[in-house]
Image (cartoon, grey):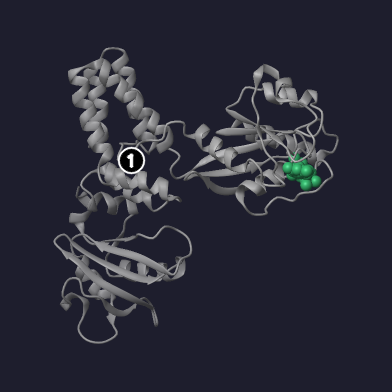
Amino acid sequence: MSSDVSSSGPQVTVLTPEGRGAIGVIRVWGKGAVEAADAAFRPARGKGLAQTPRGRLRLGRIGRGLGDEVVAVVLELDPPAVEIQCHGGPAAQGMVLEALQAVGAGAAPADQWAEHAMPTRIRAQALVDLGRTSTLRTAEILLDQAWGALDRELAGLAARILEDQEAGLMRLDRLIRHGQVGLRLITGWRVVIAGRPNVGKSRLLNALAGYARAIVDPAPGTTRDLVSVSTAMDGWPLELVDTAGVRAADDAIERSGIERALRQQATASLVLKVLDRSEPLRDFDRALVSASHPSLLVANKADLPPAWQPAELPSGAVPIVVSAERGVGLEELSTAIAEALVPAPPEPGAGVPFRSNHVERLGKAREALRAGDAESAIREIEALCL
Ligand code: GDP
């Protein structure tokens, strides 16, 4: 897919994601790319970049004053593409970018470069998102899409709808379900730990995340602020959020913490409702158990003598019994969290919609198909493939 921009002159794109890193990768591409890079590049010795054979690495400098020390290579001549590796971080990359813009290259976002480099828009988007995802599992899903899994699925789906609307609808439903995973590949899920003070929420967060972040104190109400950690379970990236104990509070600071905790629960993908196994159940615990939320019930402090039995819980709720302090039951809990977040993981090589516009369009296609309008459904699907 070549964009209009590429025919209008050289473009420059920073390919490394934002943040600090040892190396920054910058691509100069489009018509006149080799000439632009050549004009900005000062070789350590020898001839200029334009006289260097394709594929040969050159050491030199780019940028004002002494400039940054870079490695440059002409990757392709048709369409022209030059890669420049400079020092990482915004300052060095900014200097190289500025020098290339000064010789006429236009700054283009990574999406635009990817659309130029990849045969379809969806594959280009997957390539860009690949740089932003954090686990091997999510990267594998995006790699499949970068290799064309979703494009193939959409083409197959359109053909299936033409043959058999009912079967097409089932396939479309499954694809939309995969979208629920696809939309989380970069942002991850949000798992909120809730329960009254002192049941062991902070301890559990630390135990699950594997390192100490929250302050643990025997006095109830110590965790006043939300404390969160980014982690992964079964390869799914997630943010674990500890909340201030939810209970009636006199103290103003704690009350504001509790209000925030309630708001956090409302936006969570999953709530871990934590009970203290070693203390009698209170009304608050029963209310928490009964509250409707996508949730897992956790009975903590299993290392102490139990003060209640699971059968005493309302509506037959079954808790996962753990001891955050001793690290007992954590593996079972992690597995249960991963399964609750992604009950049906897409199989390897499956097409997975991963941007909100993919899921929106597929939702419209489903509406049309349910109304018996196969033509509109196919139009929506084909619009994604443009
Ligand atoms: P939070 O207020 O719900 O965040 O509770 P904390 O994590 O601060 O824990 C409150 C107290 O319970 C601390 O003294 C912890 O050491 C203790 N605690 C937490 N988990 C366990 C556990 O599994 N077993 C035992 N025996 N004590 C625990």
Q: Horizontal placement of 105 versus 181: left or right?
A: left
Q: Is residue 82 left or right of residue 179?
A: left
Residue sitting nearer the eye, 134 or 99: 134
**Pointer 1: what residue?**
348
Taking 307 as reference, is 219 above or below it?
below
Residue 292 visible, this orientation: yes
Q: Amino acid at mark 1?
A: Pro
Q: Quadrant of the C terminus?
A: top left
Extreme-top residue of the structure: 372
- Residue at the spot 39% in from the left edge and 33% down from the top edge: 179
Can you tell me which quadrant of the image ligand 1 is in?
top right
Residue for point 57% across, 27% down: 294
Any part of residue 224 in sight:
no
Q: Position of residue 143 (x, y in %)?
A: 32, 48
Residue 153, picture quadrant: top left
The local secondary structure at tag 1 comes to loop
The quadrant holding residue 165 is: top left
Point out the residue furthest to the left here.
78
- Say left or right for 179 vs 27: right
Would you identify the image quadrant in which residue 360 lies?
Answer: top left
Q: Position of residue 1 (x, y in %)?
A: 20, 47
